[in-house]
Amino acid sequence: MDSEEAAVRTLFLLLLTTLLPALAHGQVQVFACEPEWGALTNALAGDRAEVFVATTANQDPHHIEARPSLIAKMRRADLVVCTGAELEVGWLPLLIRRSGNPNVQTDQPGYFEAAMSVPRLNIPETLDRSHGDVHSAGNPHVHLDPHRLLSIARALAERLQQVDPPHQAHYQQRLDDFAQHWQRRIQHWEQQAQALSGLKVVVHHQDWLYLNHWLGLNQVATIEPRPGIPPSAADQKRLLRTLTDQPPDAILIAGYQNPQAARWLAERLQVPLVTLPYTVGGDSHSNGLSELFQRTLHLLLQTRKVAP
């Protein structure tokens, strides 16, 4: 090999090293906003990703402080996986902006919004702040419908392949395995859940819209008078009067929500107050995605006094 050919080869290798992402030689650094997306990313990436989850099941994902430690994690991320649809609008844009990380800006492959990968419910025709904290892109709590979750898994696997192209086959195989397992679980859950169709529920917030839609639950009221607005004493009494003649079968809240208003209503209506895990880690029985759905069904079936 003459010197000119050697120089060309060296230049080619240098360019190749520069153009290929650094993560091709290590793990994909993933910043997941919520536990469900951390769990899904781990399922799809396995040892190809190091996943940091920014929040816990005990935190309201609408209201998170943009701490310096989160900015530091964002600065090192190759991929951000969040709910989107404005769920994290109060803190995620600030983290991205302050991180200065070009790879995770909203127009880059390193930015992934799960909710925008699937059809959303309750997209408002008009926006009016008097209606409360309404999301213009629709209800963002999409992870509680396992069919939508599978669609999101497919979109996320494609994004992982895009940011880590040398390992596309790895992500495809793990997606295939996940999809096969998940479809079996959905079939099993839907057989279990037949007894829940028509169950009348009151919810604290619109967290359960997709769960209700999937299971055929009948949401008859919301404790919040408007999304994101805590109920006043007058709101509570008004709701009690409305429900007294036709009480619900159960009142549903998430573990991160203040139970005071829901407990007050449940005691007066003499109906069960059910604290659902909402996300991975929401209680001691919900340490994975499958466990999250199984536990949720178990708790709901108890209101029907049906063993899962």
Image (cartoon, rainbow, N blue to C red):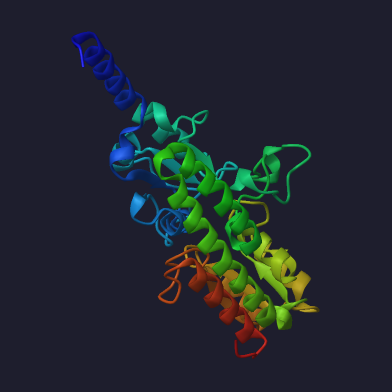
* In the foreground, 114 or 232: 114
The residue under the point 62% across, 43% down is 116
Which one is in front, 121 or 26? 26
Q: Quadrant of residue 282?
A: bottom left
Q: How many marks?
A: 0
> Measured from the top left, where is residue 136 in percent x and y?
67, 39
The answer to whether residue 147 is left or right of residue 254 is right
Task: In this rendered view, identify the residue nearer to me: 194 or 276.
Answer: 194
Q: Quadrant of the N terminus?
A: top left
- In percent of the image, x 36 and y 25: which residue is there? 19
Residue placed furthest toward the front: 1
Q: Position of residue 221 (x, y in %)?
A: 72, 65
Residue 214 at x, y percent in the picture: 70, 66
Q: Is residue 119 above or below residue 146?
A: above
Give the left or right position of residue 2, taking residue 67 as reference. Answer: left
Asked whether residue 3 appears in the rendered view, the answer is yes
Quadrant of the image occupied by residue 236: bottom right
Give coordinates of residue 58: x percent, y percent. Answer: 42, 62
Q: Is residue 173 left or right of residue 213?
A: left
| Snapshot quadrant of residue 233 | bottom right
Q: Which quarter shows the C terminus?
A: bottom right
In the image, residue 109 above or below residue 251: above
Q: Is residue 50 visible?
A: no
